[in-house]
Image: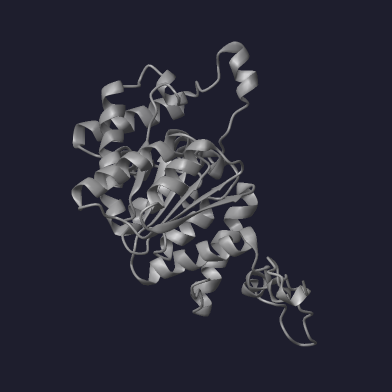
Amino acid sequence: MPIGRRPNKVRAEEFAKPPEHAAAGRAAPAFGAFIDSLPDILVARDFRRVVSAIVSAHRAKRAVVFMLGGHVVKTGLTPLLIDLMERRVITHIATNGSTAIHDYEMARFGATSEDVAAGLRDGTFGMAEETGRGMNEAITAGHAHGYGMGEALGRALEQEPALAHPELSMLLAGRRLGVPVTVHAAIGAEIIHQHPAADGAAIGDTSHRDFRRLSASLDGLDGGGVVVNTGSAVIMPEVFLKALTIARNLHGGRPTGFLTCDLDMQRHYRPRVNVVERPTQNGGAGYEITGHHEIMLPLLAWAIADALERGSGKPVP
Protein backbone atom coordinates (compact mmCIF):
# COMPACT_ATOMS: atom_id res chain seq x y z
CA MET A 1 0.00 0.00 0.00
CA PRO A 2 1.43 3.44 -0.86
CA ILE A 3 2.17 5.49 2.25
CA GLY A 4 0.03 8.29 0.90
CA ARG A 5 -3.03 6.08 1.38
CA ARG A 6 -2.15 5.13 4.95
CA PRO A 7 -4.07 6.84 7.76
CA ASN A 8 -1.63 8.62 10.10
CA LYS A 9 -2.17 9.75 13.69
CA VAL A 10 0.41 12.56 13.60
CA ARG A 11 0.90 15.28 10.98
CA ALA A 12 3.69 17.77 10.47
CA GLU A 13 1.46 20.79 11.03
CA GLU A 14 0.69 19.52 14.54
CA PHE A 15 4.30 19.64 15.74
CA ALA A 16 5.57 22.05 18.38
CA LYS A 17 7.20 25.32 17.39
CA PRO A 18 10.46 26.61 18.90
CA PRO A 19 10.61 30.07 20.52
CA GLU A 20 11.00 32.94 18.11
CA HIS A 21 14.17 34.98 18.46
CA ALA A 22 13.53 38.53 19.55
CA ALA A 23 14.64 40.90 16.81
CA ALA A 24 16.80 43.88 17.67
CA GLY A 25 14.73 46.53 19.41
CA ARG A 26 11.70 44.28 19.73
CA ALA A 27 10.25 42.57 22.79
CA ALA A 28 10.59 38.86 23.36
CA PRO A 29 7.62 36.69 22.34
CA ALA A 30 4.54 36.97 24.57
CA PHE A 31 3.30 34.12 26.73
CA GLY A 32 0.50 33.48 24.26
CA ALA A 33 3.08 32.66 21.63
CA PHE A 34 4.26 29.81 23.86
CA ILE A 35 0.71 28.45 24.20
CA ASP A 36 0.19 28.75 20.44
CA SER A 37 3.45 26.88 19.88
CA LEU A 38 2.35 23.78 21.77
CA PRO A 39 1.87 20.70 19.60
CA ASP A 40 -1.74 20.12 18.62
CA ILE A 41 -1.45 16.59 19.96
CA LEU A 42 -2.73 14.61 22.97
CA VAL A 43 -2.68 16.46 26.33
CA ALA A 44 -1.31 19.68 24.81
CA ARG A 45 -4.44 19.83 22.68
CA ASP A 46 -6.56 19.02 25.75
CA PHE A 47 -4.89 21.82 27.69
CA ARG A 48 -5.73 24.34 24.99
CA ARG A 49 -9.31 23.07 24.90
CA VAL A 50 -9.63 23.63 28.65
CA VAL A 51 -8.22 27.16 28.35
CA SER A 52 -10.56 27.91 25.46
CA ALA A 53 -13.56 26.55 27.36
CA ILE A 54 -12.81 28.67 30.45
CA VAL A 55 -12.41 31.82 28.36
CA SER A 56 -15.62 31.05 26.46
CA ALA A 57 -17.49 30.37 29.71
CA HIS A 58 -16.34 33.71 31.10
CA ARG A 59 -17.50 35.57 28.02
CA ALA A 60 -20.84 33.77 27.98
CA LYS A 61 -21.30 34.39 31.73
CA ARG A 62 -21.40 30.69 32.53
CA ALA A 63 -20.13 29.22 35.79
CA VAL A 64 -16.44 28.42 36.23
CA VAL A 65 -16.00 26.37 39.40
CA PHE A 66 -12.60 25.50 40.86
CA MET A 67 -12.46 22.72 43.43
CA LEU A 68 -9.30 22.69 45.54
CA GLY A 69 -7.25 20.62 47.94
CA GLY A 70 -4.79 21.99 50.48
CA HIS A 71 -1.67 21.32 48.41
CA VAL A 72 -2.72 24.11 46.04
CA VAL A 73 -2.28 26.66 48.85
CA LYS A 74 0.89 25.05 50.18
CA THR A 75 2.56 25.36 46.78
CA GLY A 76 1.96 29.11 46.70
CA LEU A 77 -0.74 29.29 44.03
CA THR A 78 -3.38 31.36 45.81
CA PRO A 79 -2.45 34.65 44.05
CA LEU A 80 -3.20 33.09 40.66
CA LEU A 81 -6.65 31.95 41.74
CA ILE A 82 -7.42 35.30 43.35
CA ASP A 83 -6.42 37.01 40.10
CA LEU A 84 -8.89 34.84 38.19
CA MET A 85 -11.53 35.74 40.78
CA GLU A 86 -10.76 39.42 40.28
CA ARG A 87 -11.04 39.00 36.51
CA ARG A 88 -14.50 37.48 37.14
CA VAL A 89 -13.41 34.25 35.51
CA ILE A 90 -13.82 32.01 38.57
CA THR A 91 -17.39 32.18 39.81
CA HIS A 92 -17.13 29.70 42.71
CA ILE A 93 -14.28 28.27 44.80
CA ALA A 94 -15.09 25.00 46.58
CA THR A 95 -12.47 23.62 48.97
CA ASN A 96 -11.90 20.79 51.37
CA GLY A 97 -11.16 21.60 55.01
CA SER A 98 -7.37 21.54 54.72
CA THR A 99 -7.46 24.22 52.03
CA ALA A 100 -9.38 26.55 54.33
CA ILE A 101 -6.92 25.90 57.17
CA HIS A 102 -3.88 26.75 55.06
CA ASP A 103 -5.63 29.80 53.60
CA TYR A 104 -6.60 31.03 57.08
CA GLU A 105 -3.07 30.56 58.43
CA MET A 106 -1.45 32.33 55.49
CA ALA A 107 -3.75 35.32 55.90
CA ARG A 108 -3.38 35.54 59.65
CA PHE A 109 0.20 34.43 60.30
CA GLY A 110 1.94 34.46 56.92
CA ALA A 111 3.05 30.81 57.26
CA THR A 112 1.50 27.34 57.19
CA SER A 113 2.23 23.60 56.74
CA GLU A 114 3.87 22.06 59.80
CA ASP A 115 6.20 19.06 60.06
CA VAL A 116 3.62 16.29 60.50
CA ALA A 117 6.09 13.51 61.35
CA ALA A 118 7.80 15.56 64.06
CA GLY A 119 4.53 16.71 65.61
CA LEU A 120 3.03 13.24 65.53
CA ARG A 121 5.80 11.86 67.73
CA ASP A 122 4.90 14.00 70.73
CA GLY A 123 1.25 14.71 69.98
CA THR A 124 1.70 18.36 69.01
CA PHE A 125 0.70 17.92 65.34
CA GLY A 126 -2.20 20.20 64.54
CA MET A 127 -2.39 21.63 68.05
CA ALA A 128 -1.57 25.28 67.33
CA GLU A 129 -3.82 27.23 69.68
CA GLU A 130 -4.46 30.26 67.50
CA THR A 131 -5.51 28.25 64.45
CA GLY A 132 -7.72 25.79 66.33
CA ARG A 133 -9.40 28.31 68.55
CA GLY A 134 -9.75 31.04 65.93
CA MET A 135 -11.26 28.85 63.24
CA ASN A 136 -13.56 26.92 65.57
CA GLU A 137 -14.87 30.09 67.17
CA ALA A 138 -15.53 31.50 63.70
CA ILE A 139 -17.41 28.36 62.70
CA THR A 140 -19.45 28.39 65.91
CA ALA A 141 -20.36 32.03 65.32
CA GLY A 142 -21.28 31.17 61.73
CA HIS A 143 -23.58 28.43 62.99
CA ALA A 144 -25.32 30.91 65.29
CA HIS A 145 -25.81 33.47 62.50
CA GLY A 146 -26.71 31.10 59.65
CA TYR A 147 -23.49 31.48 57.67
CA GLY A 148 -21.75 28.88 55.58
CA MET A 149 -18.29 27.81 56.74
CA GLY A 150 -16.44 29.76 54.08
CA GLU A 151 -18.40 32.91 54.81
CA ALA A 152 -17.92 32.47 58.56
CA LEU A 153 -14.14 32.14 58.23
CA GLY A 154 -13.93 35.07 55.84
CA ARG A 155 -15.92 37.27 58.19
CA ALA A 156 -13.68 36.26 61.10
CA LEU A 157 -10.56 37.18 59.15
CA GLU A 158 -12.08 40.56 58.28
CA GLN A 159 -12.46 41.25 61.99
CA GLU A 160 -8.88 40.38 62.88
CA PRO A 161 -7.01 43.56 63.89
CA ALA A 162 -3.73 42.58 62.24
CA LEU A 163 -3.34 40.11 59.39
CA ALA A 164 0.08 39.11 58.06
CA HIS A 165 -0.97 38.61 54.42
CA PRO A 166 -4.65 39.28 53.74
CA GLU A 167 -3.90 39.57 50.03
CA LEU A 168 -3.10 35.84 49.90
CA SER A 169 -6.48 34.66 51.21
CA MET A 170 -9.18 33.26 48.95
CA LEU A 171 -11.58 33.43 51.90
CA LEU A 172 -11.07 37.19 52.09
CA ALA A 173 -11.05 37.63 48.30
CA GLY A 174 -14.40 35.87 48.13
CA ARG A 175 -15.84 38.28 50.68
CA ARG A 176 -14.41 41.28 48.86
CA LEU A 177 -15.50 40.19 45.38
CA GLY A 178 -18.79 38.48 46.15
CA VAL A 179 -17.51 35.14 44.85
CA PRO A 180 -18.73 32.16 46.89
CA VAL A 181 -15.94 30.29 48.69
CA THR A 182 -17.40 27.15 50.21
CA VAL A 183 -15.70 24.72 52.59
CA HIS A 184 -16.62 21.04 52.63
CA ALA A 185 -15.45 19.47 55.86
CA ALA A 186 -14.75 15.83 56.72
CA ILE A 187 -15.21 15.32 60.45
CA GLY A 188 -12.01 14.04 62.01
CA ALA A 189 -9.90 14.62 58.91
CA GLU A 190 -8.82 18.18 59.77
CA ILE A 191 -6.55 19.45 62.53
CA ILE A 192 -9.05 21.93 63.92
CA HIS A 193 -11.34 19.03 64.91
CA GLN A 194 -8.74 17.99 67.51
CA HIS A 195 -9.25 21.15 69.55
CA PRO A 196 -11.51 21.58 72.60
CA ALA A 197 -13.25 24.47 70.84
CA ALA A 198 -14.49 22.24 68.01
CA ASP A 199 -18.28 22.01 67.86
CA GLY A 200 -19.51 19.14 65.71
CA ALA A 201 -22.96 20.65 65.27
CA ALA A 202 -21.46 23.94 64.07
CA ILE A 203 -19.03 22.20 61.71
CA GLY A 204 -21.80 20.07 60.25
CA ASP A 205 -24.30 22.90 59.88
CA THR A 206 -21.96 25.44 58.28
CA SER A 207 -20.40 22.89 55.93
CA HIS A 208 -23.82 21.56 54.93
CA ARG A 209 -24.93 25.11 54.22
CA ASP A 210 -21.91 25.43 51.92
CA PHE A 211 -22.85 22.16 50.23
CA ARG A 212 -26.23 23.63 49.36
CA ARG A 213 -24.56 26.81 48.08
CA LEU A 214 -22.32 24.78 45.80
CA SER A 215 -25.36 22.87 44.51
CA ALA A 216 -27.03 26.20 43.71
CA SER A 217 -23.96 27.45 41.82
CA LEU A 218 -23.82 24.41 39.55
CA ASP A 219 -26.94 25.41 37.61
CA GLY A 220 -24.73 28.04 35.97
CA LEU A 221 -22.67 25.32 34.29
CA ASP A 222 -25.47 24.53 31.83
CA GLY A 223 -24.47 25.06 28.21
CA GLY A 224 -20.81 25.90 28.46
CA GLY A 225 -19.58 26.14 32.05
CA VAL A 226 -16.38 24.58 33.37
CA VAL A 227 -15.39 22.64 36.49
CA VAL A 228 -11.71 22.23 37.41
CA ASN A 229 -10.66 19.88 40.21
CA THR A 230 -7.12 20.25 41.46
CA GLY A 231 -5.52 18.87 44.60
CA SER A 232 -8.44 16.85 45.95
CA ALA A 233 -8.51 13.13 45.22
CA VAL A 234 -11.54 12.18 47.35
CA ILE A 235 -13.54 14.88 49.13
CA MET A 236 -14.28 17.34 46.34
CA PRO A 237 -15.01 14.73 43.64
CA GLU A 238 -17.50 13.07 45.99
CA VAL A 239 -19.07 16.38 47.03
CA PHE A 240 -19.30 17.52 43.41
CA LEU A 241 -21.15 14.40 42.28
CA LYS A 242 -23.80 14.79 45.00
CA ALA A 243 -24.13 18.55 44.44
CA LEU A 244 -24.58 17.94 40.71
CA THR A 245 -27.28 15.40 41.46
CA ILE A 246 -29.19 18.00 43.48
CA ALA A 247 -28.82 20.62 40.73
CA ARG A 248 -30.14 18.22 38.09
CA ASN A 249 -32.95 17.03 40.33
CA LEU A 250 -34.17 20.61 40.74
CA HIS A 251 -33.68 21.72 37.12
CA GLY A 252 -35.05 18.91 34.99
CA GLY A 253 -31.76 17.16 34.33
CA ARG A 254 -29.65 20.27 33.87
CA PRO A 255 -26.88 21.33 33.91
CA THR A 256 -25.46 19.54 30.90
CA GLY A 257 -23.11 20.53 28.11
CA PHE A 258 -20.23 21.67 30.31
CA LEU A 259 -16.54 20.78 30.45
CA THR A 260 -14.71 19.22 33.37
CA CYS A 261 -10.99 18.86 34.02
CA ASP A 262 -9.05 17.00 36.68
CA LEU A 263 -5.77 18.91 36.90
CA ASP A 264 -3.75 16.99 39.44
CA MET A 265 -0.39 15.45 40.29
CA GLN A 266 -1.67 11.88 40.01
CA ARG A 267 -4.60 10.14 38.43
CA HIS A 268 -7.09 8.69 40.87
CA TYR A 269 -10.34 6.77 40.55
CA ARG A 270 -12.74 9.31 42.05
CA PRO A 271 -11.62 12.39 40.10
CA ARG A 272 -11.65 10.40 36.88
CA VAL A 273 -15.08 8.86 37.43
CA ASN A 274 -16.86 11.56 39.48
CA VAL A 275 -15.46 14.64 37.74
CA VAL A 276 -14.25 13.66 34.26
CA GLU A 277 -16.51 10.79 33.15
CA ARG A 278 -19.93 10.53 34.81
CA PRO A 279 -20.97 14.22 34.81
CA THR A 280 -20.29 14.61 31.06
CA GLN A 281 -21.80 11.37 29.76
CA ASN A 282 -24.96 13.09 28.49
CA GLY A 283 -23.23 16.07 26.90
CA GLY A 284 -20.01 17.94 27.45
CA ALA A 285 -16.40 16.83 27.69
CA GLY A 286 -14.02 15.73 30.43
CA TYR A 287 -10.23 15.83 30.53
CA GLU A 288 -7.44 14.53 32.75
CA ILE A 289 -4.28 16.66 32.72
CA THR A 290 -1.60 15.34 35.02
CA GLY A 291 1.28 17.39 36.40
CA HIS A 292 2.62 19.19 39.44
CA HIS A 293 0.33 21.93 40.72
CA GLU A 294 3.14 24.46 40.98
CA ILE A 295 3.74 24.15 37.23
CA MET A 296 0.33 23.31 35.75
CA LEU A 297 -1.78 25.91 37.56
CA PRO A 298 0.50 28.82 36.61
CA LEU A 299 0.41 27.60 33.00
CA LEU A 300 -3.37 27.50 33.10
CA ALA A 301 -3.79 30.87 34.81
CA TRP A 302 -1.33 32.63 32.51
CA ALA A 303 -2.88 31.06 29.42
CA ILE A 304 -6.36 32.22 30.48
CA ALA A 305 -5.19 35.75 31.27
CA ASP A 306 -3.27 36.01 27.99
CA ALA A 307 -6.26 34.79 25.96
CA LEU A 308 -8.52 37.32 27.66
CA GLU A 309 -6.12 40.21 27.07
CA ARG A 310 -5.44 39.24 23.45
CA GLY A 311 -9.12 38.76 22.75
CA SER A 312 -8.38 35.23 21.63
CA GLY A 313 -9.49 31.92 23.09
CA LYS A 314 -11.23 30.58 20.00
CA PRO A 315 -12.64 27.07 20.37
CA VAL A 316 -10.05 24.37 19.79
CA PRO A 317 -11.43 21.60 17.52
Rendered view: 4 above or below 199: below
Q: Which colour scheme is used?
A: one colour
**Residue at image coords 20%, 53%:** 252
Residue closer to the observer: 134 or 257: 257
Rendered view: 183 above or below 131: below
Residue closer to the observer: 108 or 294: 294
Q: Is residue 117 left or right of residue 82?
A: right
Residue 175: x and y in percent read: 33, 51
Q: Quadrant of the N terminus?
A: bottom right
Residue closer to the observer: 58 or 150: 58
- The answer to whether residue 19 is visible is no
Q: Is residue 201 left or right of residue 54?
A: left
**Residue at image coords 35%, 58%:** 177
- The answer to whether residue 193 is visible is yes
Residue 101: x and y in percent read: 46, 35
Q: Is residue 111 left or right of residue 24?
A: left
Residue closer to the observer: 204 or 292: 292
Residue 3: x and y in percent read: 77, 73
Q: Which corner quadrant of the image does residue 48 belong to?
A: bottom right
Residue 86: x and y in percent read: 42, 62
